Image (cartoon, grey):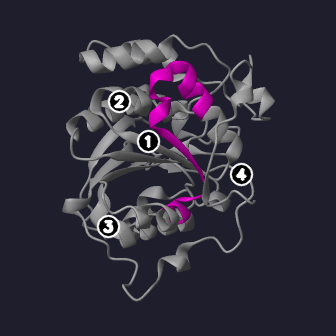
């Protein structure tokens, strides 16, 4: 697509739309919305309570794919890193679940947000959901159509004056996650931390959902991280293949990890390789990021 590897503008026609998901032809499968469970995460601190309250007031047709615990752990993680980064790069926005929490955090912790996805419809929907939830934050947000290697090549490599946190919840395929993480090698001095979601995800072999193993492939088996998010036991349905794509969560494993770059090192790629080796050969058509 002509816009792949570039910033795009929000879709202003969605502002008066009752169902942006339908307008963008996005299928809402489970309809799960974490806001219905978020009351269990309140009364931890005033920032969590403020953001949870704002997000819980939005009524819209969408679905979330992270647990309430993961979303609130994102808030506390960014609070703990406050002042040590200037911009958060959200890779894989889906329907704006994490995006809304990041927008709320940006108001407390003063950072900008770049939303990155190969699917333009998801970018448009996530932005509109953020606009309705945190209209005062939209001036901090840019939309980038592409994957993480493309963003790294065209944006990060040209900006040496900022410190970044990368939140990765895009492709979960082993090969793509390796490409995504490897691209960061070329801008490693600018990356303060990487947050990766779905490190407990497995499914049908054709999907190759191995985010955790891809992190070990790039950063080595002595990976240093802090776990975040939910941990499920064998007794829950979530640890058995679902009816949509056969995905499930490994029992006893955390949902995500925070990797401080100062404590980790790249064991891949080799310094003789070039970032262009990790760029897509053909611009990706709209698909699930």
The span from disc 1 to disc 4 (Cα, nearest Å) is 22 Å
Residue density around tag 3, few if under 14, some if 14–19, many if 20 or more, within 10 Å: some
Horizontally, residue 54 falls left or right of residue 78, namely right
Which is more N-terminal, label 3 or label 1? Answer: 1
Which is more N-terminal, label 4 or label 1? Answer: 1
Q: Are marks 1 and 2 in contact (CB under 8 Å)?
A: no
Q: Residue at x 31, y 20 (%)?
A: 48
Placement of 110 over or under 167, stated as above or below: above
Q: Does the magenta segment cover residue 215?
A: no
Q: Residue at x 32, y 67 (%)?
A: 188
Q: Which mark is residue 188?
A: 3
Q: Which segment did they paint magenta? A: 127-151
In this orientation, does residue 191 appear? yes
Q: Which residue is mark 4?
A: 287
Horizontally, residue 248 falls left or right of residue 110, namely right
Which residue lies most toward the bottom here? 272
Tell me the quarter of the image containing the N terminus.
Answer: bottom right
Horizontally, residue 43 falls left or right of residue 155, namely left
Q: Which mark is residue 105?
A: 2
- Disc nearest the viewer among 2 and 4: 2
Q: Residue at x 71, y 51 (%)?
A: 287
Q: Which residue is mark 1?
A: 113
The span from disc 2 to disc 3 (Cα, nearest Å) is 24 Å
């Amino acid at each position: 697509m002509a816009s792949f590897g570039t910033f795009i503008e929000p879709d202003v026609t969605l502002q008066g739309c009752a169902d942006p998901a339908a307008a963008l032809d996005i299928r809402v499968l489970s309809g799960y919305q974490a806001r219905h469970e978020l009351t269990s995460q309140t009364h931890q601190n005033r920032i969590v309570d403020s953001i949870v309250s704002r997000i819980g007031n939005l009524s819209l047709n969408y679905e979330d794919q992270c647990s309430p615990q993961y979303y609130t752990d994102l808030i506390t993680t960014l609070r703990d890193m406050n002042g040590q980064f200037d911009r958060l790069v959200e890779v894989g926005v889906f329907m704006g679940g994490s995006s809304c929490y990041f927008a709320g955090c940006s108001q407390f912790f003063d950072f900008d947000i770049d939303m990155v996805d190969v699917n333009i419809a998801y970018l448009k929907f996530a932005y509109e959901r953020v606009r309705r939830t945190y209209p005062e934050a939209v001036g901090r947000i840019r939309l980038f159509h592409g994957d993480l290697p493309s963003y790294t090549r065209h944006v990060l490599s040209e900006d040496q004056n900022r410190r970044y946190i990368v939140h990765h919840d895009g492709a979960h395929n082993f090969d793509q996650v390796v490409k995504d993480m490897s691209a960061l090698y070329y801008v490693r001095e600018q990356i303060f931390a990487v947050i990766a979601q779905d490190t407990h995800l497995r499914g049908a072999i054709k999907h190759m959902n191995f985010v955790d193993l891809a992190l070990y492939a790039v950063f080595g088996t002595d990976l240093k991280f802090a776990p975040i998010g939910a941990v499920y036991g064998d007794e829950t349905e979530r640890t058995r293949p679902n009816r949509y794509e056969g995905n499930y969560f490994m029992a006893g494993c955390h949902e995500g990890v925070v990797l401080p770059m100062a404590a980790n090192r790249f064991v891949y790629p080799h310094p003789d390789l070039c970032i262009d080796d990790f760029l897509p050969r053909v611009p990706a058509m709209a698909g699930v990021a």
